[in-house]
Amino acid sequence: MKRPINEIILHCTATPSTTTIESIRNYHVNVKGWRDIGYHFLVQNGKVITGRPVSEVGAHCKGHNLNTIGITYIGYEPTELDIETLATLCNKLISEYPITKITRHCRYDKHKTCPNFDDGHINDFDKLCELPLQ
């Protein structure tokens, strides 16, 4: 059965921007005890890195993994390139799946600021993406 996907949730790793995907995967698997990296896609320096297959439920937002795609940028604060790459990736996924909203992780966890977007970041993202950021 194909997994129903209707939402993208955006994250940040809150790690240095030089953090490797291998170290993130290692943390998720060996520290958190997950079977794989929790995110479906990771963005670093303008490159999109595939994490967990989209066909599999992610482990990126407690209570909101079943119908979502989890995307993170590697770092604390997004760069202009991060915003552009995230918006481009979201547009690609919107064309492939019946996605109706894109949500910041902090909307689902009041203890998180992730993805650390200020109003300027949100405006920049919204100018580039087909759906507004929530």
Image (cartoon, rainbow, N blue to C red):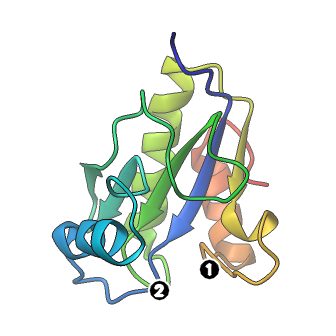
Residue 127 location (% of width, % of height): 64, 50
Q: Residues within 10 Å of mark 2 (few under 14, many from 20)?
A: some
In depth, the one of 118 and 8 nearer the eye is 8
**What kind of element bears circle 1?**
loop
Residue 126 location (% of width, % of height): 68, 52
Quadrant hosting residue 100: top right
Q: Residue at 50% of width from left, 84% of height from top?
A: 77
Q: Residue at 21% of width from left, 76% of height from top?
A: 23
Q: Residue at 68% of width from left, 64% of height from top?
A: 105
Quadrant that contains the C terminus: bottom right
Q: CA distance from mark 1 to mark 2?
A: 7 Å
Q: Residue furthest top?
A: 1
Q: Residues within 10 Å of mark 1 (few under 14, many from 20)?
A: many
Q: Which residue is mark 1?
A: 116
Residue type at mark 2?
Tyr
The circle on residue 134 is none
Considering only order in the chain, which callout, 2 or 1, is on the residue closer to the N terminus?
2
Say if 68 sits above or below 21 in the image. Answer: above
Q: Give the tally of numbered discs.
A: 2
Say if 47 sits above or below 45 in the image. Answer: above
**What kind of element bears circle 2?**
loop
In depth, the one of 84 and 53 nearer the eye is 53
Say if 111 sits above or below 103 in the image. Answer: below
The circle on residue 76 is 2
108 on left or right of 57: right
